[in-house]
Structure formats: structure tokens, C-alpha cells
Image: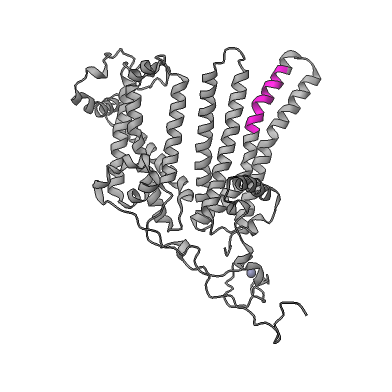
Amino acid sequence: MPDDAHPMGDPPVEMVPEYWPSACSDTPRPARTIHGLFALPGFLLLWIVPKRIGASLAASGWRAAIVAHVLAMALGGGLILWAEMYNWSSLSASFWAPSWAPNVNRPIVSIGQLPWTDCVRGPFAAWALWAHESGIGAVGFARVLLIVLGVEACAVLVAVGIMPWAAAGEDVLRLFGRCLRLTWWSTTLMIPLGIAWLMHPVIRPILGLPPEWHPFDYIALSGIGLLWLSILLRSTRRYAGPAEGPAWTPRTPRCESCGYRISHPPHAGNCPECGRPVVDSLPEHRSPPAFGEANEFINGVRAYGATLHQVVFEPRFFSHLAIHTAHRRARTFFLLTCLINSLLVFVATFGFEGRIPPKQAILLQVVADAVTAASVCFGIQMLLGGLLAALISAVSRRPMQSAGVMVFYAQSTLLMWGVGVAALPWAGYRSSAWLDRYPTNIAAASGAVIVMAIALTPFVLGTYGTLRALRRAVRDTRYANA
Ligand SMILES: [Zn+2]
């Protein structure tokens, strides 16, 4: 007789309850809120303590967020335009020469010589001048309108891309509103950027920099980009709204194969629709992966490798993954993936440019290019990952938080792209060196082809692996009970 047999005969058969408890049982802690335009000075605190102030600013409503955004774009953008339009900043020549700037010598003045009223009017005057120079009448108006709409479309895209990162389990519309308001609030970083841009020619001699654009400027711009992303991401981390949405809604037990409601059959029974044993659909079958439970740094590194291995080599990984909980760890997992990829891009750019051209390359220039490439790679990965999760959430009608968890794990195979990016320049350099040296040699030519093929393999593997993981993730978590 087995140990667990009931002494009085068969054990009572456990029934599947009507509902399983909601994924989240805590009520969000409300944030201190300042209503209306009184919240405006809050942007200064947002730059310093984004996590703490983000929830308050998001809760202070639409009006303050819109005014903060419009003011930031008008002031910050105006300051940059001002700096670019006038020749006192010698930056325009070597950076992008704006197509709308007429090729005339503008008076060179120093900002110190301007009365303060002109300084205040400057950014707005720059906008007016720019709008005037963009074209007269309907064409000019249409052009300005198109640019404004483009900028706002980008803001909406960023807000959507940040949704799976920010999701706390609230309704999707409320989540979108919170992300859009915080994206608008985060654009206030344009103001210090604009001031720095305008004051650049004054700051340069103090720092001992040459008058033209310098690697230092690109590193600083990348730094500001990363700072903006970090402020935006951290500001969305705390949700202080009402406990309404998928995370606080009790879930209907469903067969994980066909989605049939299994509230009534006992654990020992089968799904009335497809015959899958009810036991296989119980939430106990799903849990966070190794990384979801590792807390210490060393354990975390080990668990990252273990989870990566599972995503790639374990076909049933997504059948056992709990997608309604441990969202924060999944987010950290994907952040690490983005970080490793960006480091690979950094190493690749550094190694590549450090070699070609071997003599003229200036170290700081190479570092600047590597930092810029790595930062751009980091931002693009984060936002594209978020956009993909948002798309899957919309198409397959699953909560944003759950879509985020599965996509954050499924995309780890993209690391192969980083390996490819790191290998490709080296392979290209090697192949072209062989071909230059032995232009007519068949062996050199085939060697070059083989090396290039090897370098391209990670891209193929990475794309294939990610598509496969995404397909499994979507299929195996469709009716996930945990
Ligand atoms: Zn079924």
C-alpha cells in the first residue's frame, strides 16, 4: 500500500475551485499627489528621484504632463535651434548642417552680451525664425506640423514600448495613460540638454576642448540618452493607482491545451473538451525559472546562464514558466541580455576601429564611437523588446505583464546577434586582408567565404532561435493558469 493512500479507503477527490485567486493580493500604496499645474516643478525631482516621484507625477493628471511636455519641447528644442542657427556656436558646421539654415553669415554674439530679456525670448524667437524659414504659407505650416506630429508619434511609440516594462497588472488603457504621461514628463530633460547645447561654446574652452565637435560630445550625448532611458524606466516602476486590472482579478481555471473551463471536474478527471488530464493544468506546474528565484549576485549570474540554457535547449520551458508572477525578475533578465549585447557591440566597434585604420585611429574617437554604438544598441533593444511584447499582448489578448514576462525570456537568444556583431568586423577585416594579399588565389577566396559564413552564422542562429522561442512562448502560455 503506498504511503499516501487514505487509511479509510480512497482519498477524497479534490475539485478545481470556481476561481483561482488573483496573481496580486496587495493593494498598491497610494502616492502623494499634487493636482493640476502645481505639479509642474516636480520635473526637477523626477531627474533626481525618478522612482519615488514618478508615481506622483503620473497620478497628477494629463494637464500637468501636457504642459510640462510642451514647455520642455518649446524651451529645450528652441535652445538647440538657437544654438544651431547662429554662428556663435561653431558646432553647426561640423555636426549636421541644417538644410533649412540659409547660407549667410549671421552676426556672432556672445550670450554674455545679451540682455536677459533676449535670453528668455531666444528659444521662442528661434522657433519662429525656423518656422518662417521652413517655408511660407501652407507649405511651411504643413512642414512644421509634420515634424511636430512625427515627434509626438515617437513619444507614443516610446510609451507603448515602455508598457511591458512598466506593467503592474492594471488595465491596459490606464497603463498606456501612465506610460504616455511619464514619457512626456521625461522629455523635460530637453531643457538641461538645450542649455548645455547653447552654452557649449562657452564651456568648451573651460574643458580645454577644440571648437569643433569632439568625441567627448558624442560620449556626453550617449550619456544623456542613457540617463533619459533610465529616468523613464525608473519613473514607471511604481504603480500607485487603484487595484483594478488583470493582476487583481481572480482567474478562471482553464485547460492549458484547449482553454476549456475546468472549474468543475475533480483533479483526477480529464478535460471534457480535449481529454488532457486536469492535473496537468494545475498552477503548481508553473513556476518562475532559476533566474526568477536567485537573489544574490553570484547566484544570479549562475541562474542567468541556467535560464538562458533552458530557453534555448528545453522545448517545454514555456509550458512550465509562470507568466503571471515574477515580472520584475523577468525584466531584470532582459535588461541583462540587452546589457551583454551592448557590451559585445562595444567590444566589436572598439576592436574594429582600433584596427582599421591602424595608425590614424585616435583612442578617444574609437571609444566615443564604441560608446555611441553600444548606447544606441541598448536603447533600441529595450524599446523593440517592449514593442514586441505590447504587440503580442494586443494580438493574443493576454495581460501586458504576462506578455512582458514571456517575451523578456524568449528574446534571450538574441544574444547570438551580439556575438555576430562582434565577429563580423573581425571576419570582414580578415577576409579582405586575404583577398588583398592573394587576389587570384582560389584558396584565399574560399577561406574568405568560409570565414564570412562562420561570422554570419550567429545572426541566422539568433534569429531562428528567437523566432522559435517566441512561437513556443505564445503557444505554451496561451491558457497559462499561473
Ligand atoms: Zn482541454
When the figure is inspected, residue 377 is found, relative to residue 312, above or below; the finding is above
Is residue 125 in view from this perspective?
yes
Left or right: residue 275 compared with residue 376: right
Q: Tell me which image quadrant ligand 1 sits in.
A: bottom right
The quadrant holding residue 138 is: top left
Name the residue: 37% across, 46% down: 182
Name the residue: 67% across, 76% down: 268
Residue 121, image x, y percentages: 22, 27
Left or right: residue 456 compared with residue 294: right
Please tell me which residue lies in front, 160 or 481. 481
Please tell me which residue lies in front, 75 or 241. 241
Please identify the quadrant where the N terminus is shown: bottom right
When the figure is inspected, residue 232 is found, relative to residue 77, above or below; the finding is below
Residue 197, image x, y percentages: 35, 25
Q: Could you tell me what secondary structure mostly forms the magenta stretch?
A: helix
Counting the numbered discs, the total is: 0
Name the residue: 29% across, 34% down: 74
| Magenta residue span | 420-433
Is residue 258 in view from this perspective?
no
Residue 352, image x, y percentages: 62, 23
How is this picture coloured? one colour
When the figure is inspected, residue 283 is found, relative to residue 299, above or below; the finding is below
Left or right: residue 164 compared with residue 67: right
Magenta stretch: includes residue 424 = yes
Magenta stretch: includes residue 411 = no
Q: Residue furthest bottom?
A: 8
Please identify the quadrant where the C terminus is shown: bottom right
